[in-house]
Amino acid sequence: MAGNTSSVKTPDGGSGAARQIAILMLLAAVAGLGVGLLGGAFRWCIDQAEHLRIQVFAFAHDQPGWGWVIAIAVTGIGATLAALLVKWVPQAAGSGIQYVEAVERGEEPPSALGVLVAKFVGGVLSIGSGMVLGREGPTVHIGAVLGAEAARRSRRPAADARTLHSALSGAGLAVAFNAPLGGSLFVIEEVAQSVRARIVLPTLTGVAVAVATAWIVVGNAPIFDVKPVPPPDLAQVGVFAVFGLLTGVLGAGYNRLILGFLTAARAARRVPPVAQAAIIGGAVGLLLFFDPLGAGGGDPISQGLLQGDSLIPLVLAATLVIRFLAGPLSYAAGTPGGLFAPLLAIGALWGALCGSLAKLVLPEIADTTVVVFVLVGMTSMFAATIRAPLTGIAVVVEMTAVATVLAPMLAASVCAILVAAALRTRPIYEDLRERMLHPPAVRPVFPSRRDRA
């Protein structure tokens, strides 16, 4: 990593560089206000949409014989409307994190202000209707857009617009999870991959202002309510290292499944993207009719498991498989939504499953240890797929207010990354960025005469 000095060169040396950074910090604070208000409003709107969806699905369950049609219609229509927005504003598709990273590397220009509206409305429609996507992708992109807009409005050079685009993306992540440290590390570890005063100080400023502002809208409580967890025994750290090795295999498979579904959707090019989104949305809606916990980012699942809900391994395994397939399928629809939150839910389910099985074999494992498996599963799954272990650990610690299991988290995350790399998978956003910039050539699923020729 680079040293923590600014890369800005000015005639008067250090004082000029400091003045440039101070300007960036001021603009980051102004943009942070907008990120906090819009990000908080986005979280609130999704909560309201999800409450409404739950009520509609409850009504559907009360209808004998045909209630499943309502479930298909709700999620299918939500996905269709979101896909129409993406058709008008293509940059609003998917997570947006890969686009933020492309801007940081000078491969794309900063997003225009119109992306913000499409990302906000499309994200509410998509996630609120039940698509298995996370709220953090849209808020990251919303933050980046506001950062670049602050630079444009103040007539700053293109380099400053890129810097603020990256810095405020961390504010968006921080607001999504009420995780200021996680949002800051996200910029340093994942987006910029550098520790420089020019990026670090505006990031910290924007994150602090955004999170404090979001508290006005959604409060400042941790996302999950978790009882105190005693630190595990030193001897158990080795057990969690082995668990991390297994999680690396799961994470590598998840990455490949995401890319596989995206390739399949692209290959079916004779089916318009909006129609694909409608079909996928309908399929997810039917799935949710039978398994309501499969919807959205999966926070209710993680919350229950973190509170020690006892589920038999068969139920845990079935729910894990459903979400393992539904998340990549939802992402292939191309509607606005992220990967982080669904990843954490899969990690929680995986941890609970492995912890429950370990408890059957080793009776000395207590219920609190199973909760440790859940926490470690969340961080190691994040590490295996995103390859940003410090960000994942910080996000989970801040979401749960539990910091007593850092050693198992670190051990499992390192092992998960090693296995995922050994299986020749790359960080998911590296693959997604490359696909965005250089779409792969694929054989059509339904070839036309020209294709066959």
Image (cartoon, rainbow, N blue to C red):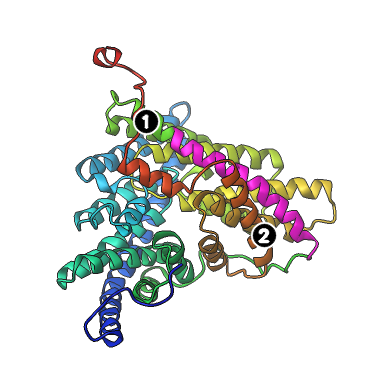
Query: Which residue is the site of mark 1?
Result: 265
Q: Residue at x 28, y 75 (%)?
A: 8
**Which is more N-terminal, label 2 or label 1?**
1
Residue 279 showing in the rendered view: no
- Dominant SS in magenta: helix
The C terminus - image quarter: top left
Residue 216 higher or lower than 347, as above or below: below
Image quarter of residue 79: top left
User: Bounds of the magenta span?
Assistant: 234-260
The spot of residue 450 in percent (x, y) is 24, 15
At label 2, which amino acid type do we have?
Answer: Ala
Residue 444 higher or lower than 280, as above or below: above
The spot of residue 69 in percent (x, y) is 40, 30
The spot of residue 349 in percent (x, y) is 62, 48
Asked if residue 50 lies left or right of residue 364, the reply is left
Query: Which residue is the site of mark 2?
Result: 411
Q: Is residue 238 magenta?
A: yes
The spot of residue 81 in percent (x, y) is 27, 40
Q: Residue at x 43, y 70 (%)?
A: 2
Q: Residue at x 29, y 68 (%)?
A: 164
Q: Residue at x 15, y 70 (%)?
A: 153
Label 1, residues with CA under 10 Å away: few <14, some 14-19, many ≥20: many
Asked if residue 65 lies left or right of residue 85, the reply is right
Asked if residue 114 lies left or right of residue 234, the reply is left
Which residue is most to the right? 363
